[in-house]
Each structure stands twice: as structure tokens, then as C-alpha cells.
Image: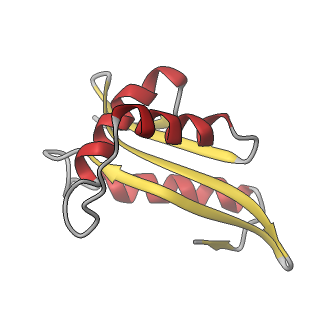
Amino acid sequence: MVRIRKMKPKDIVQAARIMMREFSKPPYKEKWSTRGARKRIKEILESRRGFCIVAEEKREVTGYAICSGFTWFDGERGLVEDIAVKEGFQGKGIGTGLVKQIERHYAKKGAAIII
């Protein structure tokens, strides 16, 4: 059973592996280094306005989302920076679960728009 929860610092390594693998594929073809991927996730996780979550099954991180909040002229916004699901777990509703959790989080913050 997949559980979605707030990301913890110990999850960065697994999330970075997913990031490097999934974003290296088309259409992105990004070439993240281990250090760079970990740094990117850690920056948002430690940010005051960051919101990071993971999908977990049997202590394995199977997906993640990193987001940041910001103020706009007409209210709060949520920005989904990255969202990815590990190969082999795609097509099972994990990404949908992550998005729904993001929507709930930003609704509580009063954000009318998520980008």
C-alpha cells in the first residue's frame, strides 16, 4: 500500500535517484549529477516556503514532488517544481495521489492557483 507523506532529509537520496533516472528520459533528457539532484531537492526541502512529499511503499520511495509557494498580486500560489514516479510504479495512481496532496496543501494555505 502506497502512503504519501512529507519528505524527510533521509528521503533525499532516493528522491534524487528517481529524479536523475526519470528526467534523463525524453522529452527532458536532463543530465543531473547525484550531487546536483540532491542539492536541488535539499534546497527546496529546507526552504521556508518549500513543500516536499514522497510516495512510499514498504519503506521505498516510489515517487516524489517538490513545490514552492509564493505570493502574487491577488493571493498565494503553489508552484510544482518537480514531480516524478519511479519506473515500475508508474500508471498505478501514485502521481495522481501526489497531485491531490499538493492540491490539499495549497488549498489550506489559501492558494487559488497551482502552477
Q: Viewer-proximal residue, 103 or 29? A: 29
Q: Residue at (52%, 33%) from the top-left corner?
A: 7
Residue 20, compared with residue 67, is above or below; it is: above
Q: Seen in the image, is 77 located left or right of residue 3?
A: right
Residue at 30% x, 35% y is 17
Question: In the rendered image of this protein, does residue 105 appear above or below residue 45?
Answer: below
Give the residue displayed 24% in from the left and 70% down from the top: 27
Q: Quadrant of residue 33?
A: top left
Would residue 30 appear left or right of 110 to someone viewing this image? left
- Residue 60 in percent (x, y) is at 29, 26
Quadrant of image for the N terminus: top left
Q: Position of residue 66 (x, y in %)?
A: 52, 48
Residue positioned 29% across, 41% down in the render: 18
Up/down of 79 relative to 36, above or below: below
Front one among 87 and 106? 87
Q: Would you place residue 97 above or below residue 63 in this image?
A: below
